[in-house]
Structure formats: structure tokens, C-alpha cells
Amino acid sequence: MGELLHTLIQRPNFVVFVILFLWGIYIMAAHPNLVKKLIGLYIVQTSAIFFLVAFSAKDGATVPVILEGMAAVDPVGYANPLPHVLTVTAIVVQVATLGVSLALVSAIYRKFGSLDEDEILEQLK
């Protein structure tokens, strides 16, 4: 238990990731309002992006550009560009998902006159 606590103190960003992720899941599960569910989804997606950024951080690393005439390349000194590319892709997907979801919620509100999930399901019966 002491070793786990020591690890968590050394990496508080992972603790924040877990808290944000679980908070977003709770919001999506507990609230019947569709806009609040979208806010929960946005928090979950943001926590995943935060995890990618925190996981890809490397002290003293430089960009992975190999110039002509370099004899030996030590991979320890370079940052991996893949997490950064995935982060940018995740942000684009997050914005697109949120935009489409808000458009669908707007259409649902125009049709049913409510954003409450229980009221909408009751009208569908």
C-alpha cells in the first residue's frame, strides 16, 4: 500500500486522469438531461487527451529529426511523436463528435420539446 501511495504522489497527473474519467462516466450515467450527458462525454474525452499528453511527456527530449551525417542515433534522447499526433486527432474527433451530438440534441428538442431522457422515452411508447 505504501508503494502505491508513493507512486501516486510521484505522478499526480494520472490520478487527475482517473478522477476526470470517472467523473465524466458518472455524469453520463446519473443525469437524464441529454446536454449534461454530452458534458460528461466531453469530460471523458478530455481526460483521454490529458492522459495522452501526460503519458508522452519526456524530460530533456528533443524532436525526432535525424540530420544527414549523424553517425549514431540514441533513441533515449528523442520524444515519440505518435502520442502528439494521436492527441491532435483526438481533439479533432472530439470537436466533431460534440458538434454532431449538439445538432442531434437540438433536433430532439424541436421534436419532443424536452431534453429529459425519461420524458422522451415516455413519448416514444
Image (spheres, grey):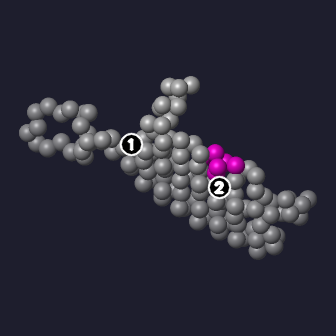
Q: Where is residue 12 in the image (x, y as percent from the top left)?
A: 48, 42
Residue type marked 1: Ser
Please report the bounds of the magenta region as a residue range. 21-26
Q: In which quarter of the image is the C terminus?
A: bottom right
Magenta stretch encompasses residue 88: no
Q: Which mark is residue 40?
A: 2
Label 1 Cα neighbours within 10 Å, binned few <14 / some 14-19 / many ≥20:
some
Which image quarter: residue 39?
bottom right
- x 39%, y 49%: residue: 85
Q: Which residue: 24% across, 37% down?
A: 77
Label of residue 80 in the image? none
Q: Distance between the residues labelled 2 and 1?
A: 25 Å
Residue placed most toward the observer, 51 or 111: 51
The residue wearing badge 1 is 56
- Image position of 69 (left or right of 44): left
- Amino acid found under the numbered disc labelled 2: Gly
Magenta span: predominant SS is helix
x, y percentage for residue 67? Answer: 14, 44
Nearer-the-camera pick, 108 or 39:
39
Local packing at callout 2 (Cα closer than 10 Å; few below 14, some 14-19, many 20+) is: many
Whether residue 22 is situated above or below residue 109 in the rendered picture: above
Residue 124 seen anywhere in this rendered image of the structure: no
Is 64 on the left or on the right of 29, as rendered?
left
> Quadrant of residue 88 in the image?
bottom left
Q: Is mark 2 on a helix, strand or loop?
A: helix
